[in-house]
Amino acid sequence: MTSASAAGPRRSLYWSVQARRNRGIRGLAVVVAGFLALYAALFPGLLTLAGFAKFSQTWFPLALTGMAQAMLMLAGGISLSMGATVSLGAVVAASVMAGSLGVAGGIAAVVATGLLVGAATGFIAVRLRLPAIIVTLAGSFIVGGAALLVLPRPGGSVPPWLSDLLAGSTPTAFALLVVVMLLWKLYAATPLGLSLYAAGENPVGAHRSGVPVEAALICAYAISGTLAALAGLFVAAQTGSGDPVIGQAFTLNSIAAAVLGGVGFLGGQGTMRGAVMGSLLLTAMINVMFFLGLPPVAQYIAQGLIIVGAVALPQVAERLRRPRKRRST
Amino acid sequence: MAPPILEAREVWKGFFGNPVLKGVSIALEPGRVHALLGENGAGKSTLINILSGALSPDAGSLQLDGRAVSLTPAAARRHGIAVVQQELSLTTHLSIAENIGLGAYPLRFGLVDYRALARSADELCRSVGLDEDVARPVGELSLGRRQLVEIAKALFRKPRVLILDEPTSSLSAHETRTLIGLVTALKRAGTAVLYISHRLAEVTEICDHVTVLKDGACTADRPLAGVDAAGLVRLMVGRDPGDLFPRWDACPAAQPAVSVRGFSAGRTMEVDLDIHPGEVLGVGGLVGQGQEDLLLGLYGAIPASAASAVFAGRPGLPGGVTRANARGVAYIPADRKREGVHLTHSIADNLLLPGLARGAGWRRRARGAEARLAATLAGRLSVKGDLDRPVQALSGGNQQKVALARWMPLDPGILLLNDPTRGVDIETKREIYAMLRGFAAEGRAILLASSDTPELVHLCDRVAVMRDGRIVAILERRDISEERIVALAMAADGVGRAA
């Protein structure tokens, strides 16, 4: 006499919830598919294994930082130190791997660095109740400075076999992205992961409901920092060495990816798959404009217009759908 | 009778030196529905927050199962105390089921067990009369439905003590019936229920025992049997006004300054109203019955419609804030920090702001004249000190005076005031009251919405009482009493309407 049988044959709650969350990003999926098709038409090499591998390698670090940014935005924050953390990850990876600790030590050092930077940022922002935007702005100077301390100029090295594995002609990056997303799914199904939505959107209500709000938020910051540092490791493998300012562009691009993916600024709104799709759209868009032969300046302007359009469209559609919703006081 | 599960003894609590609870005791027994009644600001919310661990008392003790405890929200939950508060604790982007289980998810291998969660959520939703798919995001639900989710969420933890704060305020009549059935079933199962409601018909129907608070003190703690609604109202009202209010004589003009028929705006529906020059017309009722929308609608700040309207001698609604100002209508908002004054700007700038757009036009500002005007205004409203200080340096009461004073250069004939004395100290209240009667004596028409009943009784020529967006009665001066106003506001005048 369980309720499931009483309600007739129904999809399990988990998949039903997931399916409803997909609704918000259907439009985005169509646009992404369109850009990918256009890209494949301009550059048929995309459909070969090597071509796909190269594409996924330009996508991968943006996907990781987009996810890292989305985690913080779900937590009701935002990170301006994303690029600096990527740089720090890159220089730590290149300098440790060049030393006696080798690749394993390098990876461990990068993860530890990311965790530490993220957790410290989270601790300051959450425990001291300071605005994330200020804390991460300050963090971008501190972390960026730390990267310059580790390697004042590009240097260190990543073993060629690792560069080949990650940035060669096999789509390892794509496989890693799948693994990272599965790990996120797993995390989001734990009480702490699921509570991130509540802690980000309605911290007071979540606290009253018994959610360890601060723990959920600080964990999100720590995971976010780790993802950003790992993106740095990947970038170091791509270039073969560590560059202390290589990550700069990721700060704003990661925000763009998350926003394109429908992640809101108020906390608790959006999905990780949306952010990953946003990063995919951004990558495909840049590649398409490159192949169309647009000058770089026009690319930037087009990129900006597309981002504003993508964010405005759902709002406009919503307003058209519900023309006169009563404003609550 | 069984011993109480949760008990507060002689609890005191104050905020910023202002005592809110003065030695209140309450005992919640298993299998009993306990009503908590009191006017706005009587201390009900504070008491609930203490019972649920959100606040700790300054003095007095809490007893759980006969032992003294100090509660935190987490500890209260562990001990089986659940609260359904008016401010919802839901997450709009999570599903109904995920909200119900929030903070206490069933686990399987360390992950949320969605199958078990779906089972209990389905069952709970049915018991509270919610027939939605539990996978729906809460953000898609109406306010009433969200309230039901909130109740299901409280029940998910199988509470021994359930505190319901105005659970029916946003429910339909049908949903209310279901909820009443549910509370009755919980009571039979031995749950201790604390039920806060402004609907006396509901209270007399389901509650066994009642505690009445007035100004932070218990005025009754007794079985409900044999007490009628009028008796309860008498226990809630009757504050001593002292010499807070000025003495005044009625001097209304015959020709109304504002006259609307069939006026609707936001929550306000089909209101007929005349406001005469020289009178203070009070608007009372429970919080959020449409008072604010009535004022905002008349001011033209939100869309409004009327079958017929005359404003300051001209037909038609002003239909916009600037046009309302041009007809001599001024509005003083309740939330002065957000709408009334510009906190970081100087007192002088704040005082001059509404006039800036009018007087100067595109000409250069005349600093000398401005300074003289600001000084005059400040003097008239006894705002003391250096006018170059930012407004946020002033006390709440003086900020309110600035919000009032700034309109005076426009010489408004019609003043709309929304709860002007909320959070204002006694001394400033006295000044504001004198000021308002002074304005009336000068022949201005004043509409005063207030959540403070004594203010309505002692300051107003007439009082309109609102309920569910309508004016249910307009009391003439000789008929105004706290009992009448509260009884009308709570529908205890015999017309017990469920929704």
Image: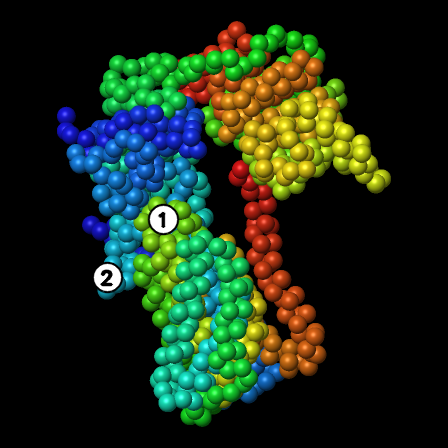
- The circle drawn on residue B474 is none
Amino acid type of the residue that numbered disc 1 sits on in the rendered structure? His
Q: Which residue is mark 2?
A: B108
Q: Could you tell whether B135 is left or right of B302 in the image?
A: left
Nearest the eye: A318 or B164: B164
Q: Identify the residue shown where x is 37% and y is 38%.
A: B85
Q: Amino acid at mark 2?
A: Arg
Q: Is residue B206 visible?
A: no
What residue is at 53 percent from the left and 59 percent from the top?
A134
Position of A15 relative to B362 (above/below):
below
Quarter containing the C terminus of chain B: top left
Disc 2 packing (10 Å; few <14; some 14–19; many ≥20):
few
Which circle, 2 or 1, is nearer the viewer? 1
Residue placed at 42% from the left, 64% from the top? A120
- Residue A153 lies, with reference to residue B15, above or below; the image says below
- Check disc 1 and report the residue beneath it: A207
